[in-house]
Amino acid sequence: MPIVSRGFKGKRRGEGPSDRVPPGQYLTDDFPVLSAGPTPHTPVDQWDFTITGEVDELTRWTWDEFRALPSETFTVDIHCVTKWSKLDTVWEGVRLDTLLERVETAVDYATAYCDGGYTTNVPLADLAGGRAWVVYGYDGELLDPEHGGPARLLVPHLYFWKSAKWVRGLRLTATDEPGFWESNGYNLYGDPWREQRYWGD
Ligand SMILES: Nc1nc2c(c(=O)[nH]1)N[C@H]1C(S)=C(S)[C@@H](COP(=O)(O)O)O[C@H]1N2
Ligand SMILES: [Mo]
């Protein structure tokens, strides 16, 4: 009987198409949960989304106001710095463009902040152009609290740590300020196609 372990790669499906799977990543069908702390459970009647910081006026949406904004269902690939990628994930949410068009600012950076205290920094340019969303639906259902429900940021062209779960707003800043993981060794920008995993990558 051969001793090779066919199960060694678990649910990995191999490396996948190189135009879809960035260097160093493997594909998974699972949806792992990665959280630096406990899952907050903020009721939607206590939820709001605020754009604050270097803005002319603070802009805020209640849950009902946010849900009344134009939304879309879309399919993207996601890439976690721990090396799993997941293709064709289906989300529902509001483009950041829709939120940012209400905001006047002279600065170029944003820090997403969350229930539970997590933060992550993203240049405003990366939040514009239909490349970033605040999502509340996944795979035809409301977003599971473990995956960031009621709502999370989704910036699929950057490593998945930029997709802040339980997001409550953006603080706009003049300089690119490291968030939680970026202060702990992760790359300030996090482009998976350039393998910008850690400081110095
Ligand atoms: N608020 C918050 N958002 C977060 C995290 C976190 O710990 N707290 N972890 C990040 C990391 S490192 C990853 S890989 C993804 C994981 O999302 P998932 O649990 O839905 O797979 O969420 C990101 N967003
Ligand atoms: Mo991650």
Image (cartoon, grey):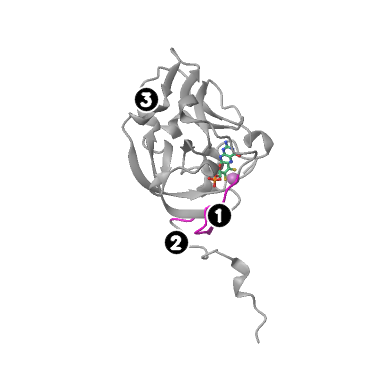
Instruction: List the residue tagged with mark 2.
Output: 17
Q: Which mark is residue 65?
A: 3
Residue 103 lies in quadrant: top left
Specify the amino acid type for callout 2.
Pro
Secondary structure of the residue carrying tag 1 is strand
Q: Position of residue 30 (x, y in %)?
A: 52, 57
Amino acid type for the residue under numbered disc 1: Trp
Label 3 CB sits under 8 Å from any ligand 1 atom = no
The disc, 1 or 3, on the residue closer to the chain's N-terminal end is 3
Q: Is residue 157 above or below residue 151?
A: below
Residue of label 1 = 84
In this picture, residue 53 sits left or right of residue 4: left
Quarter that holds the N terminus: bottom right
* Residue at figure coordinates x 40%, y 17% from the top left: 104
Q: Count the marks: how many?
A: 3
* Residue farthest to the left, as pictured: 70
Residue 102 in view, yes or no: yes
Say the numbered circle drawn on residue 40: none
Q: Secondary structure at mark 3?
A: helix
Q: Residue at x 43, y 20 (%)?
A: 60
Q: Amino acid at mark 3?
A: Glu
Rendered position, 166 above or below 141: above
Residue projecting furthest to the top: 56
How far apart in space, not on screen, are marks 1 and 3 (Cα)?
35 Å
Residue 22 highlighted magenta (yes or no): yes
Q: Which residues are magenta?
A: 20-34
Q: Residue 66, percent across and down?
A: 38, 28
Q: Does residue 109 appear in this view? A: no
Which mark is in front, 3 or 2? 3
Ligand 2 falls in which quarter?
top right
Q: Within the magenta stretch, is there residue 171?
A: no
